[in-house]
Image (spheres, rainbow, N blue to C red):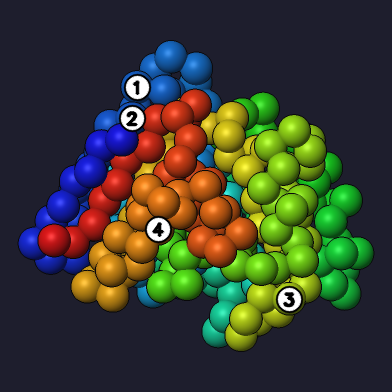
Amino acid sequence: MQDSRFPDSQKLARQLAEDLASRIRKSLAERGRVCIAVSGGTTPVAFFKALSLQDLAWDKVLITLVDERWVDEDEEGSNARLVKENLLINNAARAYFLPLKNKAANPVDGFMECENRLHELIKRLDYAVLGMGTDGHTASWFPQSKALAKALDEAGGAWCCPVTDAPAFPQRMTLSWSFLAGCRHLFLHFEGAEKDATFNRVMDPADIQNLTAMPVRTVLSQSAVPLSLYRTS
């Protein structure tokens, strides 16, 4: 696990954007197409803007979300709106965006359409940039959630999972660990002293296998997928 620390958010954002762009260029040269997943929230905004300026063959890049709140794109809580306003701009305006939310009334009803679209448009996820909450969640894998067993079931097969008991925005769709475990490279991006303290609790050797309490441990305790940490010092 690579652990990169930066003195401020802007330097972190630029370096993460440059490092991911470098990997994307190599992947495009090798395979001709790249699929990436990004997270919502306020933390990745500077990173999105820096990535949007990178000189890439963006028309060969598919961007989807790690998770999505089941709200319309014109609502403030929409991760799709966040991505469209901050990442799908500048050079990256040419990228293809695959949302997780559809017209179904709720994520349970929208699950099969979302699952089918992921399989239709993605053979394998190349890169995913995850975040981390102060409760130890990542994606929409929340501690003690009723959806957690399905979301973390690596052998379960489903690439996405409906969530109906998340905090703040209860109804969500999230990518599953079954899908993310096939990724070529994972990034975990978080900032600030509070999240550093969370990370220290997450990495407690005596509790590292307690995934239900802090689901981000799923990513941090595995060794199958290369993982890079990007955080402020």
Contact check, label 2 and label 3, Cβ < 8 Å = no
Q: Which sits earlier in the primary sequence, circle 2 or circle 4?
A: 2
- In the image, which is nearer the foreground, mark 4 or mark 3? 4
- Are there few (<14), some (14-19), or many (20+) residues within 10 Å of tag 2? some
Asked which quadrant contains residue 26, the reply is top left
x 51%, y 61%: residue: 214
> Would you place residue 204 above or below residue 164 in this image?
above
Q: Can you identify the residue that label 1 sits on?
A: 26
Q: Which sits earlier in the primary sequence, circle 2 or circle 3?
A: 2
Q: Residue furthest left?
A: 7
Q: Can you identify the residue that label 3 sits on?
A: 165
- Separation of disc 2 and disc 1 at Cα? 5 Å
Q: Can you identify the residue that label 2 sits on?
A: 23
Contact check, label 2 and label 4, Cβ < 8 Å = no
- In the image, which is nearer the foreground, mark 1 or mark 4? 4
SS label for mark 3: loop
- Separation of disc 2 and disc 3 at Cα? 36 Å
- Residue 104, percent across and down? 87, 68
Q: Can you identify the residue that label 4 sits on?
A: 202
Amino acid carrying label 2: it is Arg
